[in-house]
Amino acid sequence: MNKMVVANFKMNLSLEDVELYVQQLKGNISDKVNVVICPSFPFLFMFKSDEYKVGAQNSFYLNEGSFTGEVSTTQLKSLGVSYIIVGHSERRLYSKEDNDLINNKIKNILSNNLKPILCIGETKEERALHKTSIVIKKQIEQCLKDMDKDMLSDLTIAYEPIWAIGSGLTPKIVEIEETVNYIKTICLSKYKADNIKVLYGGSVNRNNIREINNIGGLDGVLVGSASWSARGLIEIVNNIE
Ligand code: 13P
């Protein structure tokens, strides 16, 4: 199966930047990699191509209504979005999202036949206390509450240690491998789900992508700052085939 590269622009790039990005990307993305580009909401419609898929960075947990400032999964679907990042640590931190809300968002995304990318990961303090496995298990169990194997067939989980995001630091390769396989084991034993894809995210860049890509059981990467230029993303994708 093709590896995945998910590009999370976060709150970056202007209209001008995006115009240039789209132009530079054209014809430069390998069809051997499943690339998902997640720009800010206003620019989603500008990313339409057979070369990659488009993802959103967030969505609301209801389909419509009086929820000023929110964007629904159904609206995103009408724009051609196929993936939605949910539960990113930055949303947990700055928008106070908790596992219950994330659970509702995932249910809504799945009910609209889109693919959630659930982000989980431990803080620096939790890691220092050797609590990574406990934290991850709790996040999975609470975020995937009331779900079964069939519902989870479209789910991707991204393991993003919070301390590794934007810091230039990553866990050791063997630690990533252990955690990725631990996540798969939980999904198998708890939900009988044997086809969940697991990505790694947190300071993935041109220098470490090859080594990370070789990790056994890993299905791809979730990339932040290294994907904020088309050249940067192309470089990551070229190293992952
Ligand atoms: P960086 O690649 O900039 O560390 O960001 C990772 C991330 O948060 C992707 O969702």
Image (cartoon, rainbow, N blue to C red):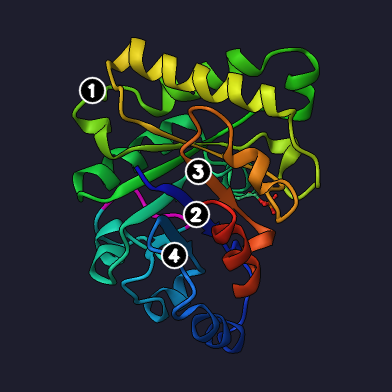
State the CA–CA distance, disc 3 to disc 2: 8 Å
- Location of residue 8 by image quarter: bottom right
Assess whether mark 4 and mark 2 are in contact (beta carbons under 8 angstroms). no
Q: Is residue 138 visible?
A: no
Which quarter of the image is occupied by the N terminus? top left
Is-magenta flag for residue 167?
no
Q: Nearer the viewer, mark 2 or mark 4?
A: 4
Task: State which region is magenta.
Answer: 57-62
Q: Nearer the viewer, mark 4 or mark 3?
A: 4
Q: Is residue 190 visible?
A: yes
Badge number at residue 30: 4
State the CA–CA distance, disc 3 to disc 1: 24 Å
Crowding at mark 4 (Cα within 10 Å: few <14, some 14-19, many 20+): some
Q: Nearer the viewer, mark 4 or mark 1?
A: 4
Q: Nearer the viewer, mark 1 or mark 2?
A: 2
Mark 3 or mark 2: whose residue is earlier in sequence: 2
Disc 1 is placed on an element classified as loop
Horizontally, residue 2 falls left or right of residue 164, namely left
Position in image of residue 118 (x %, y %): 45, 39
Badge number at residue 41: none
What residue sits right under mark 3 in the picture? 220
State the CA–CA distance, disc 2 to disc 4: 14 Å
Badge number at residue 148: 1
| Amino acid type, mark 4 | Ser
Assess whether mark 2 and mark 3 are in contact (beta carbons under 8 angstroms). yes
